[in-house]
Amino acid sequence: MLLASGLPAAARAGTNGTTQIDASTLFYGEQGRVKVLEPMARITRIYPNGQSISAQLGIDVISGASPSGATPAGVMQTTTSASGTVTTVSPDQIPVTDFQDLRGSLDVDWKKPFGIFTPAVGGHFSREKDYQSVGGNVTLSADLMQKLTTVTVGVGMNHDSTFPVNGISTGLTVPIQTGGGDDSRPGDAIAEGPSESGSTNPSSSPKKVINVLAGVSRVLTRRWMLGAHVTRTLEDGYLTEPYKVLSVLDAAGFTVKQLTEKRPDTRNRTSILGTTVYHLSSDVLYGSYRFYQDDWDLRSNTVDLKWRHELEDNRFFMPHLRYYKQTESSFFRSNLVDGQPLPEFATSDYRLGPLETVTVGGTYGFHFMEYPGEWTIRAEYMAQIGDSHPDEATGVQREFDLYPTQNIGSIVVGYSIAF
Amino acid sequence: MLQVMTRRRILSLWFVLAALAFASGCAGAFKVHPWDRDLLAEKKMSYSPDPVLMAIDDHIYFSKEGSTGGMGAAGGGCGCN
């Protein structure tokens, strides 16, 4: 559920209401890794009284390779996937596993103003091969001070379920090779060994997510809006990535074995977001800053800037710059060391390690000849920079770039029409 | 951990107080008449003028980074993180 913009929807709905259709398709590709095709469409009906109903449908077609979490082997390595595909990996190459998946999502929202108050209700459903998410949210906005100030509070709840191909791992145990199909997920060749009791692993595990939001938005001048929001997220349940492993290394830095990762079963997140929009003579500037912190000791800062520059004939160009930097979580490990006691929790997933993301790009908006609606084409480059040579790297691992910079490109083609 | 939680609570409290002061105390300093709201009515004058694009970006960064959240109360998870 998005926070209210500067004016109520009724101000733009006209006397008979308005129907807005927004459609976009994402073409996303990581160098040597994941490729995603994601079409998405949203239809919104705004009634003259300000009531609005919207539905958004999205599909993700995902394929490619994902890092398994293991360190480079230090020697030529051959792996066999669940489908029998043999892959040879050079000594310094980051181990990855091939996968493909299909995800569908549906989001619906409703809101209606009652005087100065605008309640809103939303629902979400998404499903992919090994994950399902069902959720809902409620927000209440109040327009105060002649509608120059909007205060919003909201709560959302999600019930997610993880059902990895080979069951739920208890973590930090030796994975085993298992069979699977050609469309197996990462780690389908890796599965949890039998538990000490000899019983099979549970096939699924739930995760509950509760979001609480409070925010305020203020129209400062005829041209300037400013907003601030605080979001608290409480997660409880299975939070481990079931297909990721950690390498256990000897003193020389060679792999002795691999263990499945293990994360805590709760996570408390806090994000504080400041946003601003400023209208120049015709151009518009967008800026935001987010501070994030959680009880996994991960902290991040995000700055996002856009400048919508109006061109002739209802065209525009909007350059975009985003910078993100995060610290590592308390249980992030590049690897474990053979012979040392196992930690309670451990992951080598780079997304929980020290990380910087720089995004640069631009959006071009235009109208095609005399046809209604607006087209947009956005092209962006994203670089993800990790700690290539962490202090805990041992032996031969110190010679390798353990977290090479990821180069990611994306193109989004969009179309929007209101009638 | 306790120090981190205490610092976070204090930071959140200061933020809420600052936001309330900002929302209420600016009534005199920033006055926008009804006839001055022409620019505010434009579609591009929104924190999220393209909700579909924002959803796409949210999904990308949720999948690629350790942080999440900011603009809404909706969760909408996936198995990509």
Image (cartoon, coloured by chain):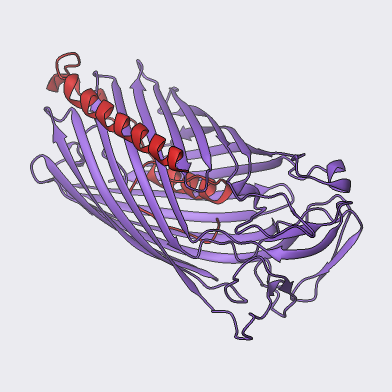
Chain colours: A purple, B red
Could you say where residue B69 lies in the image, as x and y percent from the top left?
42, 45
Residue A157 to residue B48: above or below: below
**Between A272 and B71, the one nearer to me in the picture:** A272
Give the vertical position of A232 relative to A248 (above or below): above
Quadrant of residue A136 in the image? bottom left
- The residue lying at 45 percent from left, 22 percent from top is A311
Q: In this view, does A246 lie to the left or right of A234?
A: right
Report which quarter residue A10 is drawn in.
top left
Task: Find the residue positioned furthest to the right.
Answer: A76
- Residue A206, relative to residue A291: is it above or below? below
Spot occupied by residue A125 in the image (x, y as percentages of width and height): 39, 64
Q: Nearer the viewer, residue A209 or A61?
A: A209
Residue at left 24%, top 19%?
Answer: A222
What residue occupies the far bottom of the structure in this picture?
A198
- Please tell me which residue is depicted at 36% across the width and 17% down the height of the picture: A280
Q: Quadrant location of residue B47?
A: top left
Q: Is residue A373 left or right of residue A98?
A: left
Q: How many numbered dots are placed on residues in this image?
A: 0
Q: Residue at x 50, y 33 (%)?
A: A302
Residue A184 position within the rendered picture, expressed as x and y whole percent measured from the top left? 66, 72
Residue A71 locus on image (x, y percent): 78, 53
Q: Is residue A275 visible?
A: yes
| Residue A5 visible to the viewer | no
